[in-house]
Amino acid sequence: MLQQPSRSTTGRLRHFAYFFISLFVLSGCKDTPEPSVQTTPVVTVIDVNDVTVTPSKDYVARTQAINTVNLRPRVAGYLTEQLFTEGSFVKKGQLLFNIDPAEFVIALNKAQAQLDIDKTKALESQSDLKRGKELIAKKLISQESYGKLISTAQQDSATVEAAKAVLAQAKLDLSYTRITAPFDGMIGLVNYSLGSFVNSSDSKPLATITSIDPAYVTFPVSEQDFFNYFSMSDHIEVLKKRLSLRLTLADGSKYAHTGTLDFIDPQVNEQTDTVTLRAVIPNPENKLRPGMYTTVQVSDTQKKTLPAIPQIAIQHGKNGPFVYIVKEGKALKRNIKPGPAEGIQQTVTDGVNKGDKVIVQGFLNVRNRKKVDTVEAVIDEHNNIIQKKPPQDENNTAVHHKGSKRKKL
C-alpha cells in the first residue's frame, strides 16, 4: 500500500520550486551594463610666488684646536716642581715645570771658567804677535818664528769662539730646565710624578696644552656644493667675506659667534667624494672643546629671489624630485632642483617660475600631458590648503576652470 506524502513535505517542495523559478527569471532580467564614462581629473593648484631667501645649507662638522702641543723635556733630569693645576687655563710664557738645574748650573760655571782661561791665552798670543811684528820689521826674528806667532794667535782666537759656543749651550740647557707654556690654552693631565727622571726620549709627554680661543671647525662638502660655492668666486678671500658660518650645538642651541672660512682642501677625498672646508670661530666662553661634533650652517650673505612651492607639491621619481604644473588645461611634469627651505615652503632653483600653477592635491589620476580640471587654492601659514571662492557670473552662478575654459555649475 502506497503511503501519501505528508502535507509538510509537499510544502517544502513547493518552496524549492518557487526559488529556482525566481533565479531563472532574475537572471533573464539583468540589464546590459552601461559603458563607464571617463571623467577629467580635478586637481587643486596654487600660484607659484617668489620669495627672498638667504641660501644656506647644514653640514656635520667637528671642532679642532688651532694649536696642540705635547710638552716634552729637552734635557734629562729629575722633575722638581709642577706650577699649575691640571685642566686649568695657562698663559703664554707661564712657568709650568722645573727640572733640577744643579748639574746644568755646574756645567754653565765650568763653561764660563774655560772661556775666561781661553780669553787670557788669546790675549797673550795677540800680545806676542804684536811684538813679533815689531821684531820682524827690524829683522830680529826669522820669518818662521813670526809665522808660528800668527798661527798661535789664530788658534787661541778660535779656541775662544769654541768656548763661547760651549757657554751658550750650557746657558740654553739650563733654560730648558724651566718649561713654560708656548701659547694661551688649557693644559691636561700630567703623566709624571714629582721626582721622576724625565728626558726627551720618553714615550709620554709631561702634559698636553691645547689652544681654546679661537677654534677650528672642519666639515666636508660634496663636490656639487664645492662647485656651487666656487661659482660665487674662485678666490677664498671673497668667499670669506660672503659666506657666514653659524654653529648649532649638541643641545640644539645656536652658538653665539659666527665663523669665517679660512681653508679649502686642494684635494678631493676619494673615499667620500667630498672636499674639506675649515673655518675659524671665536670661543671666548670656552663652550667649544676640540673633538666636538656639531652642525655648521653655511649661509650666503647675498640674498636671492627664488620661486617657492609647498613641500606637499613635491614628488620623487627615479630622476629625482618633480612637480606637476597646469598649463593650457594640461598637467605637465617638471623636474626641479630644490633650493633652501623657507619656512613651510621649498624654494626651487630650476624647474618652475613665478606665476606657474603647481598641483598640490589630486595627484592620483594625473598623467603627464593629460587634461585636468583645476580648483584654485592658497596655502596658509599652517600649511593648510584653502580653496579660493570660485568667481561668479552675471547670474550669480559659480564657475570653475575646466581645462582652459570655464564651466557653469
Image (cartoon, rainbow, N blue to C red):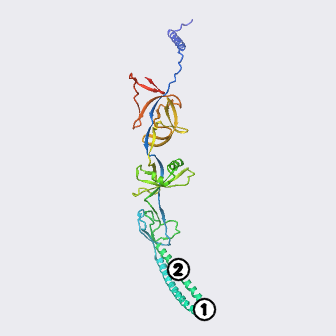
Q: Which is more foreground, mark 1 or mark 2?
A: 1
Residue at 52%, 84% in the rendered image: 118
Residue, disc 2: 161
Q: Is residue 326 above or below residue 187?
A: above
Residue at 43%, 43% in the rendered image: 52
Question: Residue 286, how many percent across, how many down?
Answer: 41, 57
For badge 1, the amino acid type reads: Ser
Residue at 46%, 75% in the rendered image: 101
Q: Which is more toward the observer, 279 or 89?
A: 279
For badge 2, the amino acid type reads: Glu
Q: Mark 1: few, some, or many residues within 10 Å (few <14, many ≥20)?
A: few
Which element carries disc 2, helix, strand or loop? helix
- Residue 199's disc is none
Which element carries disc 1, helix, strand or loop? loop
Q: How many numbered tags mark residues here?
A: 2
Question: Residue 12, how many percent across, how many down?
Answer: 51, 12
Question: Residue 350, how many percent across, how many down?
Answer: 50, 40
Quarter of the image containing the N terminus? top right
Real-space CA distance between mark 1 and mark 2, rounded to the nearest whole angstrom: 30 Å
Q: Is residue 386 above or below residue 141?
A: above
- Whichever of labels 1 and 2 marks the residue nearer the N terminus, that label is 1
Q: Mark 2: few, some, or many residues within 10 Å (few <14, many ≥20)?
A: some
Question: Residue 21, how many percent across, how many down?
Answer: 53, 11
Q: Which is more toward the observer, 109 or 296?
A: 296
Q: Is residue 56 above or below residue 130?
A: above
Residue, disc 1: 142
